[in-house]
Amino acid sequence: MKITRHDLYEHVKSYECATDFTGFLGFIDTPIREVSIIKMPKGRIRLKYIDVQNNIHRVDVGPGELEEIDFPC
């Protein structure tokens, strides 16, 4: 699945003060686990997760970044 870094950033930020995470990353069809969100300098965030093959992935995203990245689907 292709998604821009900005869209992923905005999606994660929309849950920043949430208490109900129903649907969080629900657009991903592939099972992932142990998702963590880390705040980075300059307003960026890092998503860290483990895929079904036990590979650790890190994706750094920030506001205004238009680069498209592959995300599990």
Image (spheres, rainbow, N blue to C red):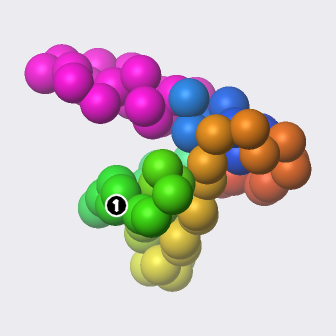
Q: What residue is disc 1 on? A: 38
Q: Using the image, determine if residue 57 lies above or below residue 40.
A: below
Is 2 covered by the magenta stretch?
A: no
How far across and down, in percent of the image, does residue 28 sit?
58, 38
In the rendered structure, the answer to whether residue 16 lies left or right of residue 23 reads left
How far across and down, in percent of the image, does residue 72 sit?
65, 52
Q: Which residue is at a point 36% across and 57% down the rendered structure image? A: 39
Judged from the image, the secondary structure of the residue bearing numbered disc 1 is strand
Q: Which residue is at a point 47% across and 78% down the rendered structure image? A: 56
Report the predominant secondary structure element of the magenta stretch: loop
Q: Looking at the figure, which quarter contains the C terminus?
A: top right
How far across and down, in percent of the image, does residue 65 sit?
77, 45
Q: Using the image, determine if residue 21 lies above or below residue 49.
A: above
In the rendered structure, the answer to whether residue 57 lies left or right of residue 3 reads left
Q: Using the image, determine if residue 47 lies above or below residue 8.
A: below
Q: Which residues are magenta?
A: 11-29
